[in-house]
Image: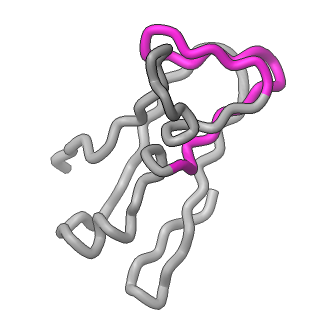
Amino acid sequence: MTSFLLQRLVLPRAETTEPLLYVRSQGDVTFVDENALLVKGAEISFDTSFGVFAAGRWKRLTAVADLSVTVHAVGSGRIELVGVSSVARGFHCAKR
């Protein structure tokens, strides 16, 4: 299988004027050198204007049939990958 990078998550920098376009955070979260450092209990979410992966758009405009996600993390925690079904348009994404 050939793989291509379709999207990279971008974290806000110190000079970012609208960080909520990139990521929403709750709790003690620090963004340093393209990394997010989370203290126990903190959360980040990429369901934002620039963070969400528009799978329906990719499906409509390309021949992409299968998607995979790679996450690089250090430490313990939980990662939730949430997909939304749109069977009416011929696209289905498995949930969790």
Q: How many marks?
A: 0
Q: Judge whether residue 38 is colored magenta.
A: yes
Residue 21 spot, x, y in % from top left: 51, 42
On screen, residue 93 versus residue 77, left or right, reads: left
Taking 25 as reference, is 66 left or right? left
Q: Residue at x 56, y 16 (%)?
A: 31
Q: Residue at x 35, y 55 (%)?
A: 67
- Horizontal arrangement in the rendering, residue 54 relative to residue 58 (left or right): right
- Residue 66 lies, with reference to residue 49, above or below; the image says below
The residue at 76%/31% (across/down) is 26
Q: Is residue 1 left or right of residue 49?
A: left
Magenta stretch bounds: 27-48
Position of residue 30 measured from the top left corner of the image (x, y, whole percent): 63, 14
- For the view shown, which residue lies furthest in the front direction? 17
Pick the residue in front: 95 or 50.
Answer: 50
Q: Is residue 16 magenta?
A: no
Residue name at image x 32 percent, y 61 percent: 66
Question: In terms of image quadrants, where is residue 77?
Answer: top right
Of 73 and 22, which appears nearest the observer? 22
